[in-house]
Image (spheres, rainbow, N blue to C red):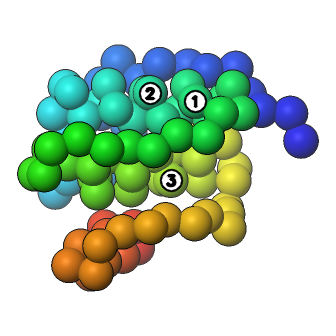
């Protein structure tokens, strides 16, 4: 299946619940993940602790589901300490 052309999110994606809000640099991270996916490249999101990798990953997977009609399966490797937060955010 051919990957779609990359379209940048200029602000927070419409499908995120109201209680979740992305900072500007997190929107940039989601755009980077989407760009890599559209080009068919693998990538790893890694930066300092506390900068929102979990919410960026949840936003990326939600974008694949809502904007590109991709339901998975997805492999996400996360620390056990963030697994509960990750699953809760993904299921909301």
Q: Which residue is at a point 86% across and 33% down the rendered structure image?
A: 2
Q: Determine which residue is flagged by label 3.
A: 61
Q: Determine which residue is flagged by label 2.
A: 32
Q: Mark 1 falls on what kind of element? A: helix
**In terms of image quadrants, where is residue 82?**
bottom left
Q: Where is residue 59 in the image (x, y as percent from the top left)?
A: 39, 48
Q: In this view, does 81 lie to the left or right of 29?
A: left
Q: Mark 2 falls on what kind of element? A: helix
Q: Mark 3 falls on what kind of element? A: helix
**In terms of image quadrants, where is residue 1?**
top right
Q: Which residue is at the front of the view, 53 or 18?
A: 53
Q: Position of residue 21 (x, y in %)?
A: 18, 44
Nearer to us: label 2 or label 3: 2
Give the total number of marks visible in the rendering.
Answer: 3
Do we see residue 92 in this rendering? Answer: no
Q: Determine which residue is flagged by label 1.
A: 36
> Is 67 located above or below residue 70 in the figure?
above
Find residue 1 and name its label: none
Identify the residue at the far left of this view: 50
Do we see residue 6 in this rendering? Answer: yes
């Amino acid at each position: 299946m051919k990957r779609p052309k990359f379209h940048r999110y200029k602000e927070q994606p419409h499908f995120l619940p109201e209680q979740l809000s992305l900072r500007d640099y997190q929107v940039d991270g989601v755009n980077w993940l989407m760009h890599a996916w559209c080009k068919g490249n693998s990538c790893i999101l890694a930066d300092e602790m506390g900068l929102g990798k979990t919410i960026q990953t949840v936003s990326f997977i939600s974008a694949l589901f809502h904007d590109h009609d991709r339901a998975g399966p997805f492999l996400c490797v996360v620390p056990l300490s963030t697994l509960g937060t990750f699953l809760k955010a993904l299921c909301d």
